[in-house]
Amino acid sequence: MIESIGGMDDPPRLNIAPGQEVIALTSMGVQHMRWGMIPVGRMNARGRPVMETIINARSETVFDKSAFADVKRAIVPASGWYEWTGAVRRKQPWRITRKDGALLYFAAIYDVWHGPGGVQVPQVATITCAPSADVRDIHHRMGVILTENQLMQWFNDDDDPVKELMKPFPDGRLRVEKADDVDWAGA
């Protein structure tokens, strides 16, 4: 789950789930996109159709898998994100933000799903990598977070300079705190 920064006439939202709209930055500007890619027409390594909606793409394989052929790059800005640990029905929510209060810029990929009747749905999937030391105790993966200085590099058409960005955010720069006081029903 991520937190929306708001914008484009949208108020900020605390709890965004896969399948909902997020704001994404592309080389063409800012737009609404559905979080989760419907991989219609995409094949897996065995030549079979990919059937599940993809909300995250692994940094280790995003440039190699045929399921991601011809996707474009996007950035999903957010004020924070949530992870949960523990047993079912007793899960502990954790809120993760930057210690300096700045926005998080998640590296992402996107394309446009063409549905029946000419419907077009811009859709995005965030990219994940191994966790930093800040996140390691609560989750085995984390989003690839770009710094402000890396945003333009992410939109580079060449994959090689972009592959250098596929690493955990530097240790000690994220705040991880219990999110017990969040009203999830109202979020």
Image (spheres, helix red, strand yellow):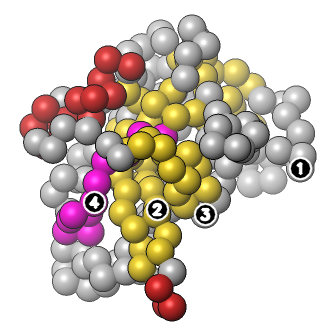
**Rendered image quadrant of residue 17:** bottom right
Which residue was labeled with disc 2?
123
Q: Is residue 84 visible?
A: no
Which residue was labeled with disc 3?
19
Q: Nearer the viewer, mark 4 or mark 3?
A: 4
Q: Is residue 60 visible?
A: yes
Crowd rating for badge 1 (residues with CA inside 10 Å; few <14, some 14–19, many 20+)? few
Q: Residue at x 32, y 43 (%)?
A: 27
Crowd rating for badge 2 (residues with CA inside 10 Å; few <14, some 14–19, many 20+)? many
Horizontal side of 3 relative to 32 (left or right) equals right
Q: Amino acid at mark 2?
A: Gln
Horizontal side of 10 relative to 72 (left or right) equals right
Q: Residue at x 19, y 74 (%)?
A: 45
Crowd rating for badge 4 (residues with CA inside 10 Å; few <14, some 14–19, many 20+)? some
Q: CA distance from mark 2 to mark 1?
A: 26 Å
Q: Amino acid at mark 3?
A: Gly
At mark 3, the secondary structure is loop
Horizontal side of 96 relative to 166 (left or right) equals right
Q: Nearer the viewer, mark 2 or mark 1?
A: 2
Q: CA distance from mark 2 to mark 4?
A: 10 Å
Q: Position of residue 127 (x, y in %)?
A: 38, 45
Q: Residue at x 30, y 23 (%)?
A: 150
Q: CA distance from mark 4 to mark 1?
A: 34 Å
Q: In the image, which residues are magenta?
A: 66-76
Q: Position of residue 22 (x, y in %)?
A: 58, 49
Which residue was labeled with disc 4?
71
Mark 3 vs 2, N-terminal side: 3
Q: Which mark is residue 161?
A: none
Q: Which mark is residue 185?
A: 1
Q: CA distance from mark 3 to mark 1?
A: 17 Å
Nearer-the-camera pick, 88 or 185: 185
